[in-house]
């Protein structure tokens, strides 16, 4: 991917026009939620849901393993440790499950105010499911990898990389380790198929929140079957994005919207 520095629109959130908000009200967007959507949220382990390098640091300390340099490294270490000691799966899950007693339901339930055509998430935590418990809007059903079916014509929450619940199997239920990312990339029919259909068949626009697509296989999977032209409208909201000027975004009609806030 080569950079094309002059082919992407950049706005501050205050500069979005009325047409954008009308599309939100009319159900013309799908939401794609990345790790930034879980930043700062308290977990059942007594800390915050870890994203990126924070998870690598936690893993390094937990297992005294200096090979944990990245999220991918940490994933492999947890997988190996759980194989040796299966009860560790409960500790692992607690890192990604919301602490209901400290969760800001009012704030996070606001994500359901727009009329989303569908919500896709790259995360396997239960933030969305927990948030909608206090939402006054229609409750959405959740679907998760490795299931490749969705809610059909009904708006849904779709966990593209799996979700954590009482039946979570690190080997089969989550796209988490290097092997599982490779497996995802090779599958023909996944929940990504619904995302492609929403854009290509139903002409929906994409709002990406909090995902920098740092894993090449995820970037490839996300864009693989989307038209590489300006018919695809993307609004990419984030604090920063190292890859916002690369081909996958510049080939489409992409607007990067800078967020200046951080969750404390």
Image (spheres, helix red, strand yellow):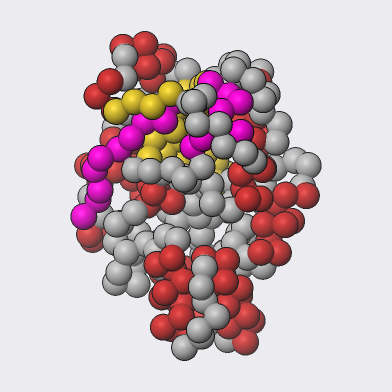
Which of the pair 242/263 is nearer the observer?
Answer: 242
Using the rendered view, name the quadrant where residue 231 is placed.
Answer: top right
Which of the pair 158/132 is nearer the observer?
Answer: 158
Q: Which residues are magenta?
A: 244-264
Locate the C terminus by quadrant: bottom left
Numbered label tally: 0
Query: Does residue 158 appear in this view?
Result: yes
Q: In the image, is residue 81 part of the stretch drawn in magenta?
A: no
Question: Is 18 placed above or below 113 here?
Answer: above
Question: Is 129 placed above or below 4 here?
Answer: below
Using the rendered view, name the quadrant where residue 137 is placed.
Answer: top left
Judge from the rendering whether residue 46 lies leftward or rightward of residue 199; answer left or right: left
Query: Does residue 32 appear in this view?
Result: no
Locate the N terminus by quadrant: top right
Q: Residue at x 47, y 18 (%)?
A: 28
Q: In the image, is residue 256 part of the stretch drawn in magenta?
A: yes
Q: Residue at x 61, y 44 (%)?
A: 219
From the top left corner, tell me how far across and down residue 15 is, in percent: 28, 20
From the top left corner, tell me how far across and down residue 240 is, in percent: 38, 43
Q: Residue at x 37, y 16 (%)?
A: 20
Judge from the rendering whether residue 19 lies leftward or rightward of residue 119; answer left or right: left
Judge from the rendering whether residue 200 lies leftward or rightward of residue 10; answer left or right: right
Q: Residue at x 46, y 77 (%)?
A: 59
From the top left corner, tell me how far across and down residue 238 is, in percent: 38, 40
């Amino acid at each position: 991917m080569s950079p094309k520095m002059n082919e992407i629109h950049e706005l501050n959130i205050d500069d979005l026009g009325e047409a954008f908000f009308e599309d939100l009200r009319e159900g013309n967007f799908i939401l794609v939620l990345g790790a930034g959507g879980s930043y700062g949220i308290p977990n059942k382990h007594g800390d915050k849901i870890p994203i990126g390098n924070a998870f690598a640091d936690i893993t390094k300390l937990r297992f005294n393993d200096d090979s944990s340099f990245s999220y991918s490294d940490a994933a492999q270490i947890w997988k190996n440790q759980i194989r040796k000691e299966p009860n560790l799966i409960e500790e692992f899950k607690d890192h990604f499950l919301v602490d209901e007693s400290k969760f800001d339901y009012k704030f996070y339930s606001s994500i359901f105010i727009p009329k989303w055509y569908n919500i896709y998430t790259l995360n396997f935590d239960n933030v969305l499911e927990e948030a909608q418990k206090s939402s006054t809007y229609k409750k959405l059903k959740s679907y998760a990898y490795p299931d490749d079916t969705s809610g059909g014509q009904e708006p849904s929450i779709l966990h593209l990389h799996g979700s954590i619940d009482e039946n979570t199997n690190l080997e089969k239920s989550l796209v988490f380790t290097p092997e599982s990312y490779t497996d995802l990339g090779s599958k023909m029919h996944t929940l990504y198929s619904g995302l492609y259909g929403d854009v290509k068949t139903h002409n929906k626009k994409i709002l990406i929140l909090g995902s920098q697509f740092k894993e090449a296989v995820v970037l490839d999977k996300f864009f693989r079957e989307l038209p590489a032209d300006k018919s695809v409208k993307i609004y990419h909201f984030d604090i920063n994005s190292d890859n916002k000027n690369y081909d996958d975004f510049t080939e489409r009609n992409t607007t990067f919207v800078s967020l200046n806030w951080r969750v404390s």
